[in-house]
Amino acid sequence: MNTALTVRWKMIRKILIGIRCFVRGWYFHFANPKYRIPAIPVGWHMIGEFQTAIRNRPELGDQNHNRIANMKMACQSICGMQLEPGQIFSLERVIGEPSAERGYLPGPVILNGKLRSSTGGGLCQISTTLFNAALLANLDILEKHNHSADIWGEQRMVDLGKDATYAYLRKDLIFRNPFKNAVILQIEVLSDCAALRCRVWSSAANPYTVNIRHQVLSEHPRFVIQTERVVKSAQGERINFTRIDTYEKNSSLHRDSARTT
């Protein structure tokens, strides 16, 4: 795709995304990505936490370093964001296009069910970790996309159904603060670079517990996974999030990655 066509495609996609957000009533409720809190206020409560391991995958070669550098850059844009009641978080609006001009490096991405290399690769670990923390914090999940294929198999970072992919102008992660009090997002690559951790803080504790249930609906010819969020309070249990994700089975990881690293 040449430069002129790329610019035109991006412009059209931005217009369509803007129209969709306006129709859904989101457009005027997105949080300001430039407004971030430098430290969690004293007395706030952690209402959601999720951590993913940053594994050294030999098949990625030098891109192991690149994907960690990309994650650190994205964390700097996200960490400390405050969502007021009713405000919406959009990963795309916060980190934007992960281009080389902005300092992002080539890293691994899953495209059409195969492992490829692209500038900004590795950010799906950011979206996955954010999604799970938001799910556990009982935030409203408005948009989430799973990967197209289970290319990692038993080496996958999280269980099927827990992943969330990010692709600029194509696949976003969007969630809303449904509470009457503000929440703050805190995300960081830990100092030893062995894990990525996200925490959601609130000025008020939630008077309930949250459990995430996963069920394999089918394994042939594709994996079909159902994910539910169960909220348990003094009034009983209720399910307030249900999603079904489908994954192609893919055993060609090492063969394809050898050409891209």
Image (tube, rainbow, N blue to C red):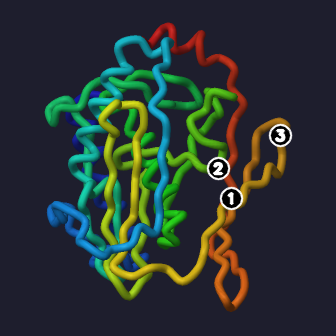
> In what element is the residue under mark 3?
loop
The residue that label 1 is drawn on is: 227
Whichever of callouts 2 and 3 sits on the residue coming sooner in the sequence is 2
Q: Nearer the viewer, residue 48 or 153?
A: 48
How crowded pointer 3 is (Cα within 10 Å; few <14, some 14-19, many 20+) is rated as few
For marks 3 and 1, give the CA distance.
15 Å
Q: Residue at x 40, y 22 (%)?
A: 117
The percent position of residue 209, horizontal first and vertical second, equals 60, 74
Q: Residue furthest bottom?
A: 235
> In what element is the residue under mark 2?
loop
For marks 2 and 1, give the CA distance.
6 Å
The residue that label 3 is drawn on is: 219
On residue 161, which mark appears? 2
Q: Residue at x 47, y 58 (%)?
A: 49
Q: Are marks 2 and 1 in contact (CB under 8 Å)?
A: yes
Whichever of callouts 2 and 1 sits on the residue coming sooner in the sequence is 2
The percent position of residue 47, horizontal first and vertical second, equals 46, 69
Q: Residue furthest front?
A: 43
Q: Nearer the viewer, residue 105 or 4?
A: 105
Q: Are marks 2 and 3 in contact (CB under 8 Å)?
A: no
- Which amino acid, by three-letter code, is at mark 2? Gly
Q: Left or right: where does residue 221 sit relative to residue 159?
A: right
